[in-house]
Amino acid sequence: MCGIFGYIGKKDAALILLDGLATLEYRGYDSSGIYVSGAGNVKTIGAVENLRKIIPKNFYGTSGIAHLRWATHGEPTERNAHPHTDCAKSVWVVHNGIVENYKELGELLSLRGHKFQSSTDTEILAHLVEEEMKLTKEFPAAVSAALKKVRGTYGAAFMHGGEPNLIVAARMGAPVVIGCGTEENFVASDASPILRHTRHVVYLHDGDVAIMRQNSHHIQTLEGAAAGRASHTIEWDEAQVQKGGYDHFMLKEIMEAPGVVENAIRGRIVTSGGLAKFGGLEAVKDKLRDVKRIVIVGCGSAYYAGLVGEYMFEECAGISTEVEFGSEFRYRKPVVDDHTLLLAISQSGETADTLEAIREAKRKGALALGIVNTVGSTIARECDAGIYNHAGPEISVASTKAFVSQLTILALVTVFLGRQRNMSLATGREILAELTQIPVKIDKILQQKDKIRKLIARYSSFRDFLYIGRKYNLPIAYEGALKLKEVSYVHAEGYGAGEMKHGPLAMIDENFPTVAIVFQDSVYEKMISNIREIEARKGPVLALATEGDNDVSALVRDVLFIPKTLEILSPILAVVPLQLFAYFNAVEKGHNVDRPRNLAKSVTVE
C-alpha cells in the first residue's frame, strides 16, 4: 500500500505536500517523492524527513503531487521512487496499486521507442499517457484512454508540465478521496492529510476520473460520462490524527480503548428490551432473521476478531458460523446461498482480499454485511448493509483500538441476532448491561501500564514466545502473538492450549516463555492443567488472570490481573494488556513502533 497526495490552489504546494506525506507515513515509507509544477521533481529513499531535507530553496509552485512508496514491483531505490515521468518529462504520475499487464504494455511501448528509467510498473502509466497525447491534445482524455488499457488496480494522480492548473485523478480498486476547499482542492489515498485543510470530501468509485482545478472538480467515468458523487463531511478532526502528547500513535490508540467502546455502543443499546439496534441494519433486518449460516471474512487482526465472533454467534445467537481468510475465500469455491450472511470485517474498508470475498459471495446470492471504520470506503459501499465502528482514525500500522471496537460491535450483533431468535430477554439485558461497564474495566487495566512496562525487563531478551488460550480467548492468543511479531520482530505463536501435547510442548524450556490467558470461566480448570504442563518443563509463564485468583499467582512466574466480566466479553479486556506488552517490548528494542518494517496499514493490493 502506498500513499498519494496532491494539491492545487494558491499556496506553497511543496509545504502542503510534505506535511501531507508526513501524515500518510503509516501507508508506506520505503521511499518518497514530490513533483511541483514549475519547480521540478525531488525524490529519495526512506521517510518523508529525508525528502524534506533535500528540497531545494525556492522550490515553489502552487500545484503538485507527492507519493510515499511501499515497494511491490522494484526494490526501494531512488530510481524506483515516485513520481514517475515519461520520455519527454512532461507527464508525471503517482500511483497506489499494481499494473498487472505492465510487461505486455512495456513491450509494446518499447517497440514504439519509449525508454524506461525504473523497474516499477507505475512508470508504464506515464508512458501510456504520453503515447495517448499523440492522438489527443486533451490531457484528461489521454489519461482515460491510457487507463482503459491497464489491467490491475490503481489510485493515481497525474499532472502535465504544460497544464499547471490541472490534476487528473483516477481510481480502480485502490482508494482515492477528493478534498474540496476554498480556492483549492486536494486528492489523497485517504482523508488524513486533507483534514487540516477541509473536512468536505468526495470518494471516487471504481472507474471514476476526477478533473481537478483550483476552483472546481468534475468527476466522470473512463468513457467520459458525468458521474455524480455525493459530498461527505468527515466527522473526525485533525487533532485525532496527532499524537496528543504520547510518544507513539500505538500507545495513544491503546489508551483510547475505553472511549472506543463507548462510541461503539452509543445509541445502540435498548436496555429495557435487551436489544441492540443499528440504523445501518434496518433495511435488512427481516433478511437477517432468515439467515441460517454466517461466514465471517477478514485479514490479519480482523480475521482474529471474526474468530471471536464465531464463538459469540454460535453459543449466544445459535447460528452456525465459520471464519475465512479474506485472501482465501474466493479461491476455494465457497458454498453460500441466499440464507448465508457474509460478514466482512475491515478497519480501512479497503482491504483488497476482503472486498473480493464480498463480491464473490454476492454473486452467489449471499447477503453481505460490513463492519468498517471508514465512512465512504469501498466495502461500506459494496455491502448490502453495514455498521460503522466510530473508532476514529487509527494511524499506527498495528491495529489496537480498531480491534477492540470490532469485538465490541460483534457482541452487539450477537445480541441483535440472538434476540431475533432464542436469546432470552434476561440474557440480552445481561450482556448489554455488562458491555456498558467494559470502558471502566479497560481503564482499570490501562492503569497497570507501568507494571507492564517494568515486566519487559524480564522478557525483552527472549526471542521466542508462545501465547495460549481456549474458547473465546484462543483468538486473543493469536492476536497477542501477532502484535508481538508486528512491532517487536520477535517470533511468537498463538496456540490452542488443548493442543500443547500434540507438538508445541516439545519446544518448552527455560528460554521459551508462555503468555497464558487463564480467566475463571468455563475452561479455567483446563487452562490450569495446561499451565502446570509448562511449569513442569521449566517454562516461564506470564498469566492474564481474573482479579482475586490467588491460585494462579502461586503457580506462575508473573501475573496481570483483569477485572471479571462475562465470558463472551472477556476478549475485549484480555487483548488490552497484550497490546501494551507488545508495545513496551518494541520500545525497549528501539523499533519504530508505529511503522514496523515491511508492513503498511491496509493492504489494497493482493
Image: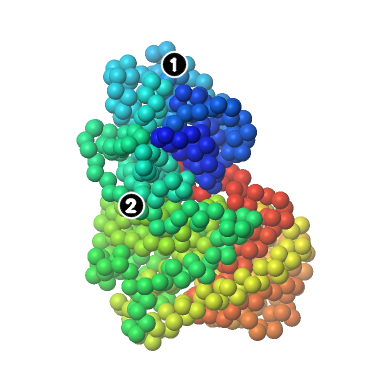
The residue labelled by disc 1 is: 88
Instruction: Look at label 2 and name its amino acid.
Output: His
Side (left or right) of 257 relative to 131 = right
Identify which residue is drawn at 53% across, 41% down: 19
* Up/down of 311 relative to 87, above or below: below
Q: Nearer the viewer, residue 117 or 48?
A: 48
Q: Nearer the viewer, residue 132 or 363?
A: 132
Side (left or right) of 29 relative to 385 = right
Q: Which percent across, then down, holds residue 362?
A: 29, 54
Q: CA distance from mark 1 to mark 2?
A: 38 Å
* Up/down of 478 relative to 207, above or below: below
Report the quarter where the C terminus lies. Answer: top left
Identify which residue is drawn at 44% across, 82% down: 433
Q: Which percent across, then down, holds residue 377?
A: 37, 51
Chain-order first, disc 1 or disc 2:
1
Q: Tell me if mark 2 has few (under 14), some (14-19) or many (20+) residues whose alpha carbon lies within 10 angstroms of its own.
A: some
- Closer to the eye: label 1 or 2: 2
Identify which residue is drawn at 75% across, 72% down: 557
Q: Tell me if mark 1 has few (under 14), some (14-19) or many (20+) residues whose alpha carbon lies within 10 angstroms of its own.
A: few
Instruction: Look at label 1 and name its amino acid.
Output: Ala
Identify which residue is drawn at 73% across, 72% down: 558
Helix or strand or loop: what does disc 2 sit on? strand
Using the rendered image of the protein, determine whether residue 237 is visible from the camera's viewpoint. Answer: yes
* Up/down of 126 relative to 321, above or below: above
Helix or strand or loop: what does disc 1 sit on? loop
Image quadrant in which you'd find residue 153: top left
Image quadrant in which you'd find residue 91: top left
Disc 1 to disc 2: CB gap under 8 Å: no
Side (left or right) of 533 relative to 566 = right
* Up/down of 127 relative to 325, above or below: above
The residue labelled by disc 2 is: 232
